[in-house]
Amino acid sequence: MAHQILILAVPGAQLLDVSGPLDVFAEANRVLHRAVYLPKIIGLDDPVIVASSGVKLLADGLLEAAVALRETTFLVAGAPDAGERTLSNKQRAQITGLCEQSRRFGSVCTGALLLAQTGLLSGKKVTTHWSASALLAARYPDTDVTADALYVMDGALRTAAGVTSGLDLALRLVEEDLGREVAQDVAANLVMFFKRPVNQNHFIREQKTSLSGRSALQDLQRWTIAHLTEVATVQQMAAHIHLSVRHLTRLFHQELQLTPGEWLEAEKVAKARQLLESGELPVKAIPAASGFSGIDTLRRAFVRRMGMTPAAYRKLC
């Protein structure tokens, strides 16, 4: 039985959120020399969809007329303004109906912010683009948002992190449907990793917290970052602003929702990443230059946060 692929593209959709997964399914058809997948693009209320890049897509049909078959995968594509778009009650009901009728459903990138409006992500483990993960978690606190995953599978629900990770998710669906060998052939033909050796943490480039304010905590953050090679413990951080470790921990929880130790480790790993990317120092010199006590300590922290060793990361830079 053929698998129907329905992708909902709202106005301003990110083109690769739509075309990326469709190319993976199309390549599977070419590998097997038959139409295993039947792809269709669905428009919200207009068959002509102007993507965020300005490219126009012609939908195969509209949301109100879409019908999910027994072997349907229904995905909601993301858009740069997805966080500002509110679906109507009618649209939420139509999307919910398609999800419930499909064998599996989900989202690509910020499409999770649209899909979440149906309530179908409640109590589910999901992911979205790293820049939208905090917004998704804040708006829908009963949703378990995994910010660093490339894709997440929870029952019939499938969510991909951002843009190109839609290809990773589609490849996993091909593997699920047709087996590992076919999926590996598809990956080879598309010149993509069968399983990418990184997670979303690899791509995060901005500070998670603002350092421009004048609060004591922000002053401490600035001082610590400037002295990463010297600050080895949370006790040193607490002593710098004349607080107990317990009080400092409370401040971090209130302001950042993490412990001082977690924040310190993240900053040291960020420094190590910067040094690895620059290529100016050998890997063995990175621990001391980023504030770690030794290569083993750096390796454990790096693997914990980046999903790979410093040496493997250097090879990708």
Image (cartoon, grey):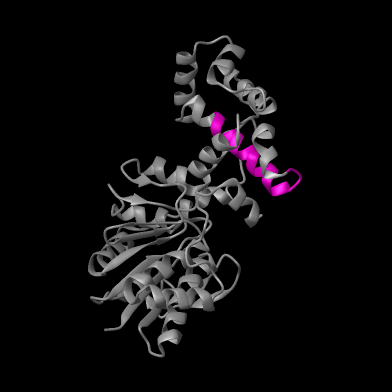
In which quadrant is the C terminus drawn?
bottom right
Q: Is residue 186 magenta?
A: no
* Residue at screen point 23% across, 69% down: 101
Principal SS element in the magenta part?
helix
Q: Bounds of the magenta span?
A: 264-281
Residue 173 vertical placement versus 297 (above, below) = below
Residue 236, position as x, y percentages in the image: 58, 16
Question: Dividing the picture into quarters, in which one does residue 225 lie?
Answer: top right
Residue at image location 41% in from the left, 90% down from the top: 33
Q: Residue 70 is drawn in which quadrant?
A: bottom left
Residue 53 location (% of width, % of height) = 60, 67
Does 267 sit above or below residue 46?
Answer: above
Tally of numbered tags: 0
Q: Residue furthest top?
A: 242
Residue 269 is one of the magenta-drawn residues? yes
230 on left or right of 3: right
Nearer-the-camera pick, 192 or 41: 192
270 vs 253, left or right, is right
- The residue lying toward the viewer, choosing from 83 and 146, is 146
Q: As displayed, is residue 28 above or below residue 132? A: below
291 or 123, which lies in front? 291
